[in-house]
Amino acid sequence: MEIIILPNPEESSRVAARLVAKQIQSKPDTVLGLATGSTPLMLYRELIRMHREEELDFSRVTTFNLDEYVGLSPDHATSYHRFMWENLFEHINIAKENVHIPDGLAEDIPVFCEAYETEIREAGGIDLQVLGIGTDGHVGFNEPTSSLASRTRIKTLTPETLSDNARFFTGDEEQPHHVLTMGIGTIMESRQVVLLAFGSGKADTVAASVEGPISSMMPASALQFHPQTHFIVDEPAAAKLTKADYYRWVYDNKPDWQQH
Ligand code: PGA
């Protein structure tokens, strides 16, 4: 794993965007795995800027999103469909038919989830997966005790995640407890992972995922088995890493050909 500690979310997002852009430039028909939440917003803004000002071309890119709320229609204000179109897809030249987001209204959930896995496989697998991380260690919506071999399926959110995400739901609107999410097994098959974490609220989780034991109680720790994962974290999120100085030295002394 590569642990990149940067002063703030802006710089972290710029490095993440460069990794995504490099991937697309080296393979124009790249398959991206994408995440929602507040963490990747600046990354998406930077990708939009690169599209507008540097001709980053998404015309042959395919995307698969990690997750969606069960029961929310694509045009629901809080759906992840809506989030992705408003924060990224509407502003780049992606082909609508190349965008895949789990269907929160799927009638037969197991059939839908299996078909989602098949679509990922048929697209050639995910080249680069963008991840955030929950305060409970989830990636996608793989909550603690998710099987580290899990595939796309329905999950029930923990009280911690419900409370973290309550800010997105207004007034008396009911917050879904159920979600569809790619599994940890699905995420582990992506060829490259870029995980972003910002703020002191993520410090314990980042330290446990990077330096703690691999455990389904800390789902992101499964990434210790992944051959090409970049954890890009800001200083507050890095505060509990015991080997932070080592990670900083490694990053500051990368050979030119390895720099992001
Ligand atoms: P956040 O969510 O980016 O809103 O902190 C992260 C996650 O739940 O994966």
Image: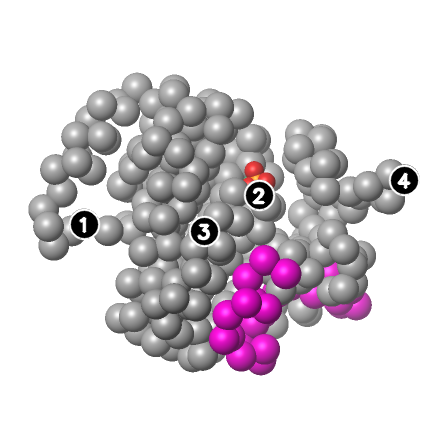
Q: CA distance from mark 4 to mark 3?
A: 31 Å
**Is residue 221 positioned above or below 59 on the image?**
above
Tag of residue 172: 4
Which residue is situated farthest in the right direction here? 172
Is 137 on the left-hand or right-hand side of 84?
left
Q: Is mark 2 within 8 Å of ligand 1?
A: yes
Q: CA distance from mark 2 to mark 3?
A: 10 Å
Colour scheme in use: one colour
Q: How busy is the neighbourhood of tag 1: few (under 14 within 10 Å), some, or many (20 plus)?
A: few
Query: In the image, ligand 1 is in what quadrant?
Result: top right
Mark sitting earlier along the chain (2/1):
2
Tag of residue 38: 2
Q: How busy is the neighbourhood of tag 2: few (under 14 within 10 Å), some, or many (20 plus)?
A: few
Mark sitting earlier along the chain (3/1):
3
In the rendered image, residue 159 lying in the magenta stretch gets the answer no
Is 192 on the left-hand or right-hand side of 47?
left
Q: CA distance from mark 3 to mark 1?
A: 18 Å
Residue at x-position 18% and y-position 49%: 259
Query: Mark 1 sits on what residue?
Result: 259
Amino acid type assigned to the residue bearing label 1 in the image? Gln
In the rendered image, residue 97 lying in the magenta stretch gets the answer yes
Tag of residue 43: 3
Range covered by the magenta-colored residues: 86-108
Residue 203 position in % (x across, y down): 45, 25
Q: CA distance from mark 2 to mark 4?
A: 22 Å
